[in-house]
Image: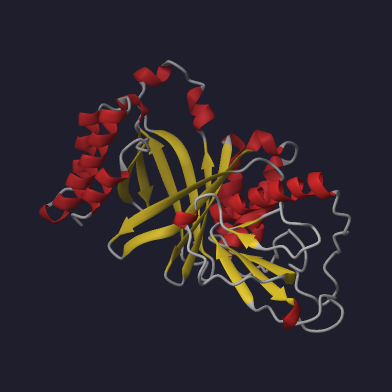
Amino acid sequence: MDLDPRNDPNKPATCRLAADPARWDDTQARTIRPTAFFLSHTMGEIGLALAEESDGPADPHAGPIRLSQCILLNPFVAKRLMLALRAWVNHHESRYGPIHEPVQPPPSGRPAGWGASEPADHGQDPADELARRVQRLGVTVGCERSFKISSNGLLTNRFLRGVSLNAIGPNAHAKVEQVCKDLAMPANLLAAFNAAIGLADYVHFGFEQEGQRCLYKVYLEFFETIAQTGNALAQDQGPHLMHLGFKWDKAEPHRQALTNYHWLAFLPVDQIHRNMAAILEGRQRRVPLEIARGIVDLAARRIAARDIVYLRVTEAGLPRAISRGTRRCLPSRIAAMLRWI
């Protein structure tokens, strides 16, 4: 539904359906005229609560404001709404003149989202806390979401936020160390982190939730250092240390791990199969091995074999393997393989 700026400016605004009324049914729609709003957010959604004139006074100093309507949007819909509102406000001002009402800062004691477009900083959600800490580095941050399959189920609340150490600029190591301290990285992991960061090119901050447990992860990446060897990689398949992972439970820091990710450069597909078979040997692991082989084969049909990054992972002496570079695989094909589990 759109606010139609073609209405007579002397008449109350009304909600009109978009150009294709066949797709919309407004028989149950109710028009409201909010005088205040409140914004909240988590990693997965943005909340917009509205107060109408009948819910309380518009003056934020005059008394309690009852928020009677709440809209929960995923971040993608919220951004589309933001762009649409911006376009309509621009259209309105070009037709009727500038809107001169000043934006008031949140009054003392009032909700942090009062009349403001900045999200409230509640400091409650561990994922939000990590995202805020990284954002304060003041550089462009890449974000990668993922899922993890384990015997306990499918974990979907996982992400990485990565930055280039060069982009951070002067005192990059000290700034990143401070982020680690703010996230309460255990002292022994922090010591190992500081010993290795001098050779790193990138740092990635990760989060994973499993039930009530929340894990923080920090990875150092050494790809540029490895790439400097150039053509030597063709003769030396490694293993080359690609990442160091520092992981700990936010609530129980003694639950921690230091993980090594070694890259075996440019392995042919048949060698990847043999390596995985050596890890997943035994009759009980036949199905996971067949799934892993199927995903690698699907990737190899869609991208060059040298673009598949095969990592050998060791953590407390337990080997495992990761193959990356499968983004062009059809999700439905991979989903079919996962149904075997």
Task: Report the residue at 69% width, 41% height from top.
Answer: 139
Count of labels shown?
Answer: 0
Q: Residue furthest left?
A: 283
Vertical arrangement, residue 106 with respect to residue 306, above or below: below
Q: Position of residue 140 (x, y in %)?
A: 65, 40
The colouring scheme, among rainbow, by chain, secondary structure or one colour, is secondary structure
The foreground one among 189 and 231 is 231
Q: Residue 258's spot in the image, x, y percent? A: 46, 52
Instruction: Please identify the quarter of the rendering in which residue 2 is found.
Output: bottom right
Q: Position of residue 63 (x, y in %)?
A: 82, 84
Spot occupied by residue 132 in the image (x, y as percentages of width and height): 66, 56
State the residue in front, 90 or 266.
90
User: 330 left or right of 200?
Assistant: left
Looking at the rendered image, the quarter that the N terminus falls into is bottom right
Residue 149 appears in the picture as rendered: yes
Q: Nearer the viewer, residue 288 or 79?
A: 79
Above or below for 307 versus 337: above
Q: Is residue 41 toward the left or the right of residue 217 in the image?
A: right
Can residue 266 be seen by looking at this rendering?
A: no
Q: Please name the residue shown 21% across and 55% down the image.
A: 339
Is 293 on the left or on the right of 178, as rendered? Answer: left
* Residue projecting furthest to the bottom: 63
Q: Quadrant of the C terminus?
A: bottom left
Work out whether residue 222 or residue 20 is closer to the camera in this orientation and state it.
Answer: 20
**In the picture shown, does residue 133 fall above or below 210?**
above
Residue at 72% x, 56% y: name it. Answer: 7
Classify residue 261 as left or right of residue 159: left
